[in-house]
Amino acid sequence: MAYTTIDDPTIYFNTLLYTGNATARSITGVGFAPNWVWIKDRSVGASEGSHALLDTVRGATKVLISNNSDSEFTGTTTLTSFDSDGFSLGTNVQVNTNTSNIVSWNWKAGGSASSNSNGSITSSVSASTTAGFSIVSYTGTGSNATIGHGLGVTPKWIIFKNRSATKGWSVYHTSYGATKFMFLNETSATQTYSPMFNDTEPTSSVFSVGTDLATNVSGNNYIAYCFAEKKGYSKFGSYTGNGNADGTFVYTGFKPSWVLVKNTSGSGDNWTILDNKRLGYNPDNRLLFPNANNADYTAVNLDLLSNGFKARSTDTTFNGSGATYIYMAFAENPFVTSTGVPNNARWLCSYLLT
């Protein structure tokens, strides 16, 4: 079996930086037609610094904000379209403040959504079985239910949002299981609660929901972002902090381009995102917090390495002694390609020949 089936991860996930100009325009250079776009103004806080999450299943003008529990709103001047190599912006300050430094994180799913009747609730799904990512839209029934996700393998991480009501972003992660949950918009630890996921683990065809407002109230509309692990491209795991500046090393099997980390055993620590573009070098990779509207934060916390990442701080956000952390990571490149060639060896040969 090949080490990876995705030699070029940037055709399924890519980070793109741009500068706002308060003028409607197209942003290109993503490298594919994105199905999920997550945008954050890196220069400002306050309301204009809120995270804007948009996808092709809901439509370009439908906006959700990860740092609050608000329902979906229509932003006609936020995104105006998803395009073949990026997206088009309006003049909304959340995505296009003049002179602001802005980041967009972009994922490719399966293009146009199709109906999925694998579960007791029929869903509308855009799924990439190659990349292990699907966007699932469904309407709640208020009764314990199953919903098709379209991945063909069991997802390890699912993020839910009630589009119709004010309610937090519920997160399922394989490491703490379906009896517990976390909220993406909060700093709390895991909570045990049966009505969230009906105490039932996802399968290769469906995930389960209970009767909580966050996942399945009758007549409310929901969106779920589902992720399955793909060797050499994505990793969704957990690790234990050691409370030492020479911190825990986490093996992913690739050089990460994007990492999301959360302390699950203690309250008060932010969900935290690093990527390989802001600034893109160790040890000063900049941080953004999905649960907060802060601007870029610079701290020595995490190194992105050729085959994983390593904590470089005693900060409990990443490396509290004995604390448990979950993470989501996507590759810049696999450690070994599908042909068995180490990427670092290819780089060394290229370097020696120039």
Image: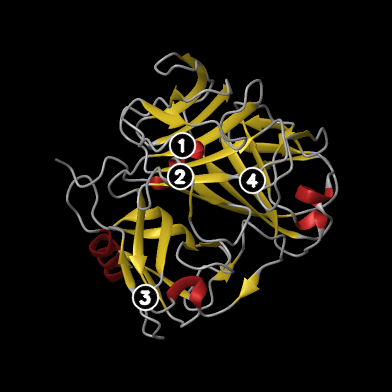
Which residue in the protein does label 2 denote? 172
Which residue in the protein does label 4 denote? 168
Which residue in the protein does label 3 denote? 322
| Circle 1 residues within 10 Å: few <14, some 14–19, many ≥20 | many
Examine the image and state in which quarter residue 187 appears: bottom right
| Circle 2 residues within 10 Å: few <14, some 14–19, many ≥20 | many
Of marks 1 and 3, which one's residue comes earlier in the chain? Answer: 1
The amino acid marked with disc number 3 is: Gly
| Circle 3 residues within 10 Å: few <14, some 14–19, many ≥20 | few
Cα distance between the residues tagged 2 and 1: 8 Å
Cα distance between the residues tagged 2 and 4: 13 Å
Examine the image and state in which quarter residue 74 appears: top right
Of marks 2 and 1, which one's residue comes earlier in the chain? Answer: 2
Cα distance between the residues tagged 3 and 2: 22 Å
Of marks 3 and 2, which one's residue comes earlier in the chain? Answer: 2
Cα distance between the residues tagged 4 and 1: 14 Å
Q: Going 46% across and 82% down the picture, which residue do you hit?
A: 313
* Local secondary structure at mark 1: helix
Q: Position of residue 167 (x, y in %)?
A: 67, 42
Q: Is residue 249 above or below residue 199?
A: below
Examine the image and state in which quarter residue 252 appears: bottom left
| Circle 4 residues within 10 Å: few <14, some 14–19, many ≥20 | many
Q: Is residue 262 above or below residue 144?
A: below
Which residue in the protein does label 1 denote? 197
Depth check, front residue: 208 or 331: 208
Q: Position of residue 298 (x, y in %)?
A: 61, 76
Q: Going 48% across and 25% down the picture, which residue do you hit?
A: 144
The amino acid marked with disc number 4 is: Gly
The amino acid marked with disc number 1 is: Phe
Q: Depth-wise, is mark 4 or mark 1 nearer the camera? A: 1
* Local secondary structure at mark 3: loop
Tag 2–tag 1 contact (CB < 8 Å): yes
